[in-house]
Amino acid sequence: MADSNEFEPKIAAFLCTWCSYAAADLAGSSRTQYPPNIRVMRVPCTGRLDPFLIIKAFNMGADGILISGCHPGDCHYLDGNLYARRRFVMLNELMQYAGVEEERLNFTWCSASEGKRFAGVVKKAVDRVKTVGPWMGFDGQGFSKEEGDLINEQL
Amino acid sequence: MAKPVLVLGGGIAGIQAATDLAEMGIPVYLVEKKPALGGKMAQLDKTFPTNDCSTCILAPKISDCYNHENVTTFTYSELENLRGTAGNFTATIKEKPRYVDVDLCTGCSECIENCPVTVEDKFNEGIDQRKAVYKYQDQAVPNVVTIDPEHCLMLNKGVCGLCAKTCDKGAINYEQTAQTKDLEVASVIFAAGYDAFDGNIVSEYGYLNYENVITSLEYERFLSASGPTGGHVVRPSDGEEAKKIAFLQCAGSRDLRSDTSYCSSVCCMYSIKQSIITKEHLKEADLDLYYMDIRAYGKGFERYYNMAQDTDGINFKRSRIAEIDKDKDTDQIEIKSVTQKGDINTDKYDLVILSVGLKPNEEVSQMMKKLKIRVNKFGFAAVDEINPLKTSRDGVYACGVITGPKDIPESVIQASGSAISAAQDAYQRQQNEQNENKETEEQKDEFKFVDNERDKIGVFVCDCGTNIAGVVDVPEVVERAKDLPFVEHSEEVRYLCSSDGQDLIGQRIKEKDLNRIVVASCTPRTHEPLFQKAVARAGLNPYLMIMTNIRDQDSWVHRDEEKKATEKAYDLVSAAAAKAKKAHSLNREKLEKIDNAFVIGGGVAGMTSALELADLGFKTYLIEKESVLGGNANNLLLTNDGQPVKNFLEKIKDRVNNHPNLELYKNYNIEEIEGYVGNYKFNLQSNQNDSQEELEGGVIIVATGANELKTDEYLAEESERVISQLDLEEMMKDNKLGDNIDKISMIQCVGSREEGREYCSRVCCTQAVNNAIFIKERFPDIDIKVFYREMRTYGFYEDKYRKARQLGVNFIRYEVENKPVVTREDNKLAISYNEPITDKEIKEETDLLVLAKAITPAESNKELSMALKVPLNEDEFFLEAHVKLRPVDFATDGVFLTGLAHGPKNLNESIAQSKAAASRAASVLAKDYLLTEAMVSTVDENLCSACGACEDVCAFKAIEVNHDKGVAEVNTVLCKGCGNCAAVCRSHAIELQGFTNEQLLDEMTALFSDRKSNIKQMGGIDNG
Amino acid sequence: MSNYDSISQEISEIAKKLLKESKVDKVIGFGLGRFTKEITPIFIKKAEDADRLIFNKNCEMSLTKYLLNYKGEKVAIVAKPCDSRAINAYLSEDLIKREDLVIIGINGCPGIEGNTACEECNIRNAVICDYSVGQEMSEEEIQAEIEGFEDEIDKMNQAERLAYFQNEFERCTRCYACREACYVCNCEQCFTDSNKPKWLGESVKLNDNFTYHLMRGIHMAGRCVNCGACEMACPEGIDVRAFAAKMCSAAEEIFDYKSGMDPEQKTLLSEYKVDDSEKGFME
């Protein structure tokens, strides 16, 4: 049982289908192990990611986020990742200014052949989030059971 | 149905040809010798000149092809025999035994881990090892294992059997035998690719003796992130980082010591690529490229070459290799080289990379000979300049490197081009059968509309044998899933992808009236289509099935953390259920289209495209603004292989003028273009009189050609004795070369490869060489000097270059900063230059000065690019959708490009590209209707404020603000479903179907609905 | 820097002329409310009323948003430099038509009392106008005005920043005055009011309040002209401008981008450069 008092963050990950999700699959088929702390949401392209979704992840209690798309130039939709890049840079500025630790915000690129790199990226993101501890919400109150139940009800 | 076509070779060329044919509605048999598709491109790390990741761009193409309903793939199979004639071939295919039941194998690889036999991994060029039971590569398609009969203990000695014991699906079958099949096909495309030269092709380079001398293909695997060294550049001798690296160009190519006297065309560029990527991996690396000429002749290559030249630590050394030795103490390789001036240098390297060339596979050459397909002296399929894709046997076409060394985009071009020729054979056959197939066509997908019913979610969790269940506690996930909102049914299944598993889903849908399905198993990237079909068979809209990946991204990567992996699996299932609850029925819409084609430009490129389409039965409008057809080719005398251009031109002009499906509009300008794929409208205005035409069509091919540079350099405007290569051909044509000419000088790269025109004009070196040979053969006494910067007689043209030298043509190199100087005194021309070997300044008279003037983009390109809303590159040639894999497409659907409008190229290349453009256009026209994507953007008109941000970010021109209505509108035909518009829409008026904001939010809500547990784990912190 | 009185006078004269010559149907400007005697937006339709137009240190509202109410009409508008940028932004989105619009732009804007945005303002001349009033300020003069300005929040550490904003947004009642005052906030339906999808809970909880301001903040990226109207409108005196101002300075610093400088300009997030910064990305 891995039941210790060590903090195990839960990270919301958004991966584009064509490169980074493929890289994650490749890490799987080559059995490259990485920490089980990410929860992947697949999107067609990082260009699909409205910054609201990322803000919302913190609103809901994600300890951090990980976003990975195709390397610049490799986008299946030609340039979606390049628009995304600006959105992320600006969002990152905003979140850090608001007092969210930079370690919680992890943006990167992984190509479809970078299975090992993907595993490394996850590990690094998890380590980064671990150094800043659990995310206590924008209110600093943590995520209580009631709140969890409330969210459940909303579903 | 049209009669099928056989495509031999599952590399990028074969995949492209097969997909194009399939898109035209023609059944295809795709045969690949190796256990998986992908060919050489799958082994590459990055591609030049954009450094795109090879796998990223190739993998989607492979899966599109493999999953296409019209493509039947035979991997690990070979052609045995081909009987019959064009339209009626019988091809015999041998499927080699894999000793694995492909239908049962899930690709889980458990058997591989248990296999005790280790052998060299050929996919990784023997750098590391694989097992006797193996997957050809990690991302193999089809994703199954193969047993190597040479090394398997069970097959050879009858002992072991561990793989069979491991496989609880019983997929291993040691009794399997080879199967032969006879396939009836209309035509055959050879896309059999190539072999890289053996590293020992020039034994002096010491490939066999020194570990630290490797081939470029081996190095490609070193650079690959998924390769044996994980992308680390190391010395094979001791695994230490390699800092000083040499690339030896033309290792075997252009070399009379080997049988490969031709230029392999791609090595300069891939070495430049490898050097740039090496610098990315290892900043302090110091790289020397030893070369004769850098042949950066393709589109965008010169800039790439310049970028490398400007990079510190990448050094281009124009030297001959004299000697290679090993330093015994340091394992370094010592290279002695000689410069053109005769200086000898000695340098030591950690790693020496032999830039090996491309040659045909010996067996394939033999097979072609056996099948009466003529091969050239090197063993490549013999084709000619006018018919670059047609072999000597009717109905058999060839594309890719099998017709000669070439890079990926040209292989793709040839592949598409050969597809349309093959299609013509297949369709001719179809004419007779046309009536019967119309009826079967009308089989519609009707699904019960359940969107407004109460959600009843069925959850199916796959064990994948032990692949998932060995780590994830599947029963627990199944139990907990039962308590999720709206889950009606939850069930564990051993193998969900088996036909039993698929049937089970259908059965439960019917029994329990399920209207949303969650499949928790492997990756949707490979299995989503399968499960979509499974639910569709049960009458449920396939987009109401949501897949989540608890194998590749859970059990396989968290093997030792069963509890956490189980928790993660549950989370993912609950997220998928939340997403499924908000899923809508989606359909791919069928839209009407107009089956006519527009071809803009009546040169060879335009005429070729137009004729191909007209031959296939499509009404084609050919628009030419001038009064004559033929364009630049009218000035050419001979093709590069010596055929008279005039005969060829007259033949096709005649066909254009008389083709029943072709309407020619000479002397017409295009006034206006509107519409989109399937529905274009052209307004034409005669430039001779008042007549106007309004025409409609579904596709557009841009074949507007290019111009010869106008320049006053080298007295071009001042003296009649200064002419261009095209003028020279005119003189040769009219027999005007004669008595009064004793000396001819030719200057190459006039206006090319300079500031402002940073590209190579590609055709000029070969043209100069050909013209020099033509003159020398007729007037051996005429002295010919060619002043050049780098001779770029790529491919088989290298033999011409050699021949010209043998005939006594002088080739004198000059540097761009020290160009020859031309002066005129009393109607006599003199040329002054630096003789590079002796380093002496020489001035001498010349009777004729022939300039290789650059090919420049047509002035009209700008206007046309705006009318068509398609881009130009920085040199103002038209810019294709993707330089590597979509060389004739624009990003805008339904618009294609070919010929000089795309960039400088030779006649045979224009012809091939024009066939390719026609082929891509035909794949749109040949369908009965346009099919939209299901997952497209939709606009809520009530929320849209018409700000236009969506329009700005759409790469496909698929969304536009309707200013009359004040709302954005999606053209679902063009929408590719990337969702960029949805993300940029501030008022959330745009939703991407299948990935709506609600779905993503609810997914997230489900994933993080339990945040209390996290806080508690911290020991003591409890805000509950 | 120009003075208020002369600006007021110039505005009145131009307005009078425009109305007399029937060049516009109305002039949107600032004036005293009939009852409150406080500065309020006024809409002058007759030349004889043009004298009511004034400009003083209390003209804090952004009038630009009213242009959306009078689409299709010929209107003149009094525009502070920040408002002129907002007009450009509307023009770039085709929300209003240039030919319907007469812009009376204020140069050398003397600023608004109590508006902290003016302290850091580096665009003090109208960037688009048909008539200019006041005196143009040189780049040196402007630099002198903003010299020494420092973002105090930027200087805090992460925990202090979080605490600072928590303390601010604790007081937020989600009255949306900041939203209503903002020219950028012209969505048909604000995300705060959306049920499908539901971005925010209705209750006034700090976690959601904070989220609201972040979401509003990212919507400001590349669009906010830092006019300070939001902050002036906040009844609780919350620093609601901070995020938007940060987006302005970040856009300028990282992408060399200032919003509303040109009617043809694309918004920051609707374009890209191939070699854009990857600031904040993982190594």
Image (cartoon, coloured by chain):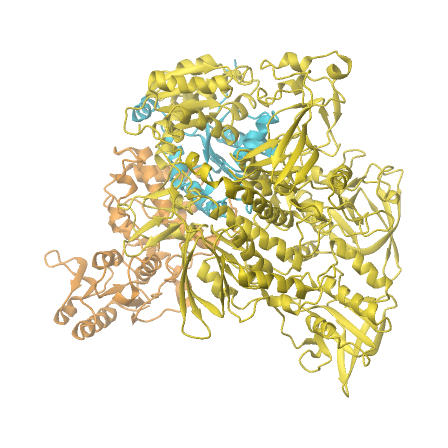
Chain colours: A cyan, B yellow, C orange
Q: Residue furthest left?
A: C35
Q: Is residue B711 above or below residue B146?
A: below
Q: Nearer the viewer, residue B56 or A12?
A: B56
Q: Is residue B782 above or below residue B467?
A: below
Q: Nearer the viewer, residue B467 or B733?
A: B733
Q: Position of residue A138 (x, y in %)?
A: 37, 34
Q: Nearer the viewer, residue B818 or B799?
A: B799
* Residue A140 in sight: no
Number of labels in the image equals 0
Q: Position of residue B951 (x, y in %)?
A: 39, 52
Place residue B557 in its image quadrant.
top right
Residue at 69% across, 78% down: B716
Q: Is residue A113 left or right of residue B685?
A: right
Q: Is residue B321 left or right of residue B314?
A: right
Place residue B170 in its image quadrant.
top right
Q: Position of residue B714 (x, y in %)?
A: 71, 76
Q: Is residue B433 above or below residue B156?
A: below
Q: Residue furthest front?
A: B432
Q: Position of residue B147 (x, y in %)?
A: 69, 22
Q: Is residue B1017 above or below residue B187?
A: above
* Residue A99 in sight: yes
Q: Is residue B421 left or right of residue B967?
A: right
Locate the C terminus of chain B and report the quarter of the image it occupies.
top left
